[in-house]
Image (spheres, rainbow, N blue to C red):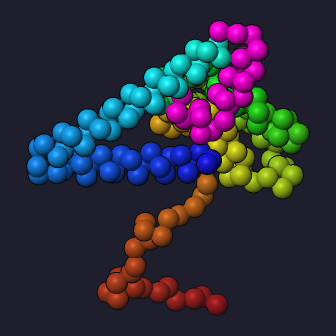
């Protein structure tokens, strides 16, 4: 399961919880939510114990690092608040992961800041991205960050040229009465 599939599943769970909250029968609603909370508590306690056991021994540290880097497990560790690597360090590692691609093309990528809702990154490209469009590079940066820090609400990337794209919804048709043509002087 990749990050987008994980996000899709968590979205599905959120929608189902909203449906449960809309149940008219209070006992059914309360029982359903208590069941969900009990399952999450059990899973969270088991995940926490796994992290604890791996953290206790030197030989467990590489396994814990590998588990923390897996997109699915990373998301669960974040969900339960037990990820062994800080948010800032995970984001910094994600930037390091994509940095060689920028350097190969004469550019750079650097972390500007991390707060509870957003990661801000500054990129510089040389203009000749050797087959990688700015959109492709933007996607790589965003994916790397969101895999490492699925709890982030947004990724702000400074330095990419703004697209000159005009969305279809902003184009208004001209009505017949508004049409006017200038006569050519030719």
Question: Which picture quadrant has residue 90?
Answer: top right
Left/right of residue 7 with respect to residue 106 in the rendered view = left
Q: Position of residue 31 (x, y in %)?
A: 21, 40
Depth check, front residue: 88 or 30? 30
SS majority, magenta? helix
Query: Which residue is pictured at 26% across the width and 35% down the height?
Result: 34
Residue 3 visible to an observer of this rendering: yes
Assess whether residue 51 is covered by the magenta stretch: no
Left/right of residue 131 with respect to residue 71 in the rendered view = right
Depth check, front residue: 40 or 22? 40
- How many tags in the picture? 0
Depth check, front residue: 134 or 136? 136
Q: Position of residue 23 (x, y in %)?
A: 17, 51
Q: Position of residue 158 (x, y in %)?
A: 62, 36
Residue 161 visible to an observer of this rendering: no
Depth check, front residue: 172 or 151? 151
Q: The C terminus is located in which quarter?
A: bottom right
Query: Which residue is pictured at 68% across the width and 22% down the height?
Result: 64
Q: Position of residue 40 (x, y in %)?
A: 39, 33
Q: Which residues are magenta?
A: 56-77
Query: Which residue is pictured at 42% across the width and 68% down the height?
Result: 169
Query: Which residue is pictured at 59% across the width and 39% down the height?
Result: 72
């Amino acid at each position: 399961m990749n990050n987008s599939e994980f996000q899709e599943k968590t979205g599905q769970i959120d929608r189902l919880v909203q449906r449960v909250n809309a149940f008219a029968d209070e006992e059914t609603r309360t029982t359903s939510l208590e069941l969900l909370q009990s399952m999450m508590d059990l899973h969270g306690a088991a995940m926490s114990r796994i992290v604890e056991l791996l953290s206790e021994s030197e030989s467990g540290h590489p396994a814990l690092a590998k588990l923390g880097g897996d997109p699915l497990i990373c998301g669960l560790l974040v969900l339960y608040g037990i990820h062994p690597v800080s948010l800032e360090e995970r984001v910094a590692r994600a930037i390091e992961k994509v940095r060689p691609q920028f350097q190969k093309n004469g550019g750079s990528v650097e972390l500007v800041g991390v707060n509870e809702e957003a990661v801000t990154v500054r990129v510089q490209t040389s203009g000749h991205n050797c087959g990688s469009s700015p959109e492709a590079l933007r996607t790589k940066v965003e994916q790397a960050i969101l895999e490492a820090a699925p709890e982030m609400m947004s990724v702000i990337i400074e330095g990419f040229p703004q697209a000159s794209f005009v969305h279809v919804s902003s184009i208004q048709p001209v009505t017949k009465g508004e049409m006017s043509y200038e006569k050519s002087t030719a």
